[in-house]
Image (tube, rainbow, N blue to C red):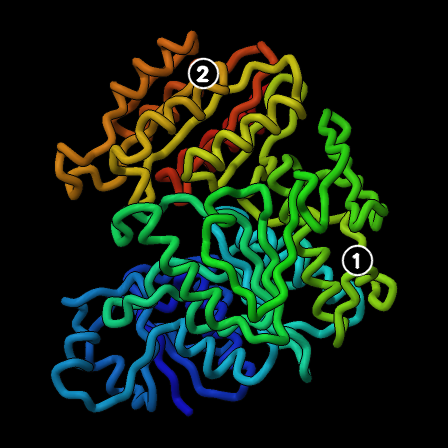
Amino acid sequence: MRVFFIGVCGTAMGNAAVLLKKLGHKVAGSDAGVYPPMSDVLTDAGIDLFEGFEENQMLDWKPDRIVVGNAVSRGNPQVERLLRTREISFVSLPQLIGEDLIGDRPSLVVAGTHGKTTTTSLTAYALEQVGSSPGYLVGGVPLDLASGNELGGGESPFVIEGDEYDSAFFDKRSKFIHYRPRILVLNNLEFDHGDIFRDLQDISRSFSHLLRIVPSDGYVLLNGDDPNLLALPDAPWTTTISVGQGEANDLRIVDFEEDSEGTRFRLFWGGEEVQEVEWNMPGLFNARNLAMAFLSTVLAQVEELDLNDPFSSAALPDFSACQGVKRRQEILVDKESLVVLSDFGHHPTAIEGTLGSLRARWPGRRIVACFEPRSNTAVTNVFQDRFADALSLADVALLGAVHRAEKIPEEKRIQPEAMIKRIEDAGKQGRSFVQNSELADYLENQLGDEPTLLVFFSNGSFDGVIDRVAKFALSSP
């Protein structure tokens, strides 16, 4: 089959295109910006790339099927041609993944507001470690796997992060509905994606729909410390297992400690220790991610679960060498006077958790947090006060330019000056910038000899500021 991807350079679209190519299909795609690293990945895989969305490029390639990316909307010339003529069948990416990549294999779906990419990567790593041959799609760049995509083999699970965001402009179901999980991981649940969900109840409804399609021989792994997940309707037809710190959880995280040497904790089941963990990945949030990956890997190996002792018949993974995923607390510069990190955090809870972890890892250092309001929710005032409170955990908070501020009505737009006032009222220093380049200029002039940890929070490029400042820091004495 000849398959054409509209919007092929997105992480998920690109990885799926590579997997489809590995299945033996002819694959091509278009995008507005065709540039490394994804363009290199696609070209190396033998995928034809077209820059721009000129409709004849698509038609001249003679595709049998079109995959329309989530970032593609009405008005796109290739989309308009599809809708106008109905010459070629088209699907959303999640539908393609569910039908062509997962197919009849057992799927292991990682869902939740935070931690999906890291938990997916850890789970795929763990399954490979115990001798399985999983397929997977990771929505980032994993540091412990050969790539972000793998077909796997046989009846081994297919591991994928299940996003609650909608599938395409013509399919408003959450993406994860298409993946039909046999093992479902629910990391956490908070309000997010304010551009498509009205409130927490609206998001919870999508998660409730997901719970309904887990089969009776499947499993639901639930963060038992999360009140929003506990408020979801029960799924009595499926075995549900809780994971967390609280005593009511089935798999417990016990004796969590974090300092400059790393992170340590133990996993308990039924009052018995099943694994002791020492690793370098930061934060309690990553301990939860590991616990979910650990239990998922065990469950993927057992045919009939013995709740009294689910671990005796399974190989247990070792996570001690794991590094995680790029742009998750990723260290770019590590010098005596300056440490620079890049983080994907774009939700107040994620920023708060990361800053708390960094404070434990680098005690005594001044922490400077730079935040780019970029996601569809972060550019609005929905979380304005919560962002300010989270950033107040740093000593200095610097706010970058609001991404595409002109597209947000002023009454709904995040107000950086109001955030800075709230940060200063909390006793911390703050400053906002109209242009991200101004923030970079400021940092290059202000970074001195005081031991400092500089962390950038953005789910985008920060207009090149992160790379620019990291290069400046590396070249400075």
Kind of element beneath mark 2: strand
Residue at x 80%, y 50% (from the top left corner): 270
Q: Is residue 453 left or right of residue 426?
A: right
- In contact (CB < 8 Å): disc 2 and disc 1: no
Residue at x 57%, y 26% (from the top left corner): 356
Residue, disc 2: 396
Return the x and y of residue 170 as percentages of the image width and height. Answer: 24, 72
**Residue 410 at least partly seen:** yes
Return the x and y of residue 271 as percentages of the image width and height. Answer: 82, 45
**Residue 43 at least partly seen:** no
Mark 2 vs mark 1, CA separation in Å: 40 Å
Give residue 236's quadrant in the image.
bottom right
Viewer-closest of 320 and 24: 320
Please name the amino acid that badge 1 sits on.
Pro
Q: Residues within 10 Å of mark 1 (few under 14, many from 20)?
A: many
Please name the amino acid that badge 2 sits on.
Val
Q: Nearer the viewer, mark 2 or mark 1?
A: 1
Return the x and y of residue 317 as percentages of the image width and height. Answer: 79, 58
Return the x and y of residue 451 as percentages of the image width and height. Answer: 61, 14
- Dividing the image into 4 quarters, which one contains the C terminus? top right
In terms of sequence position, does the residue under pointer 2 or pointer 1 come before the other? 1
Query: Total number of numbered labels?
Result: 2
Residue, disc 1: 317
Residue at x 39%, y 53% (from the top left corner): 204
Residue at x 25%, y 33% (from the top left corner): 381
Q: Is residue 171 left or right of residue 245?
A: left
Marker disc for residue 12: none
Kind of element beneath mark 1: loop
Viewer-closest of 418 and 312: 312
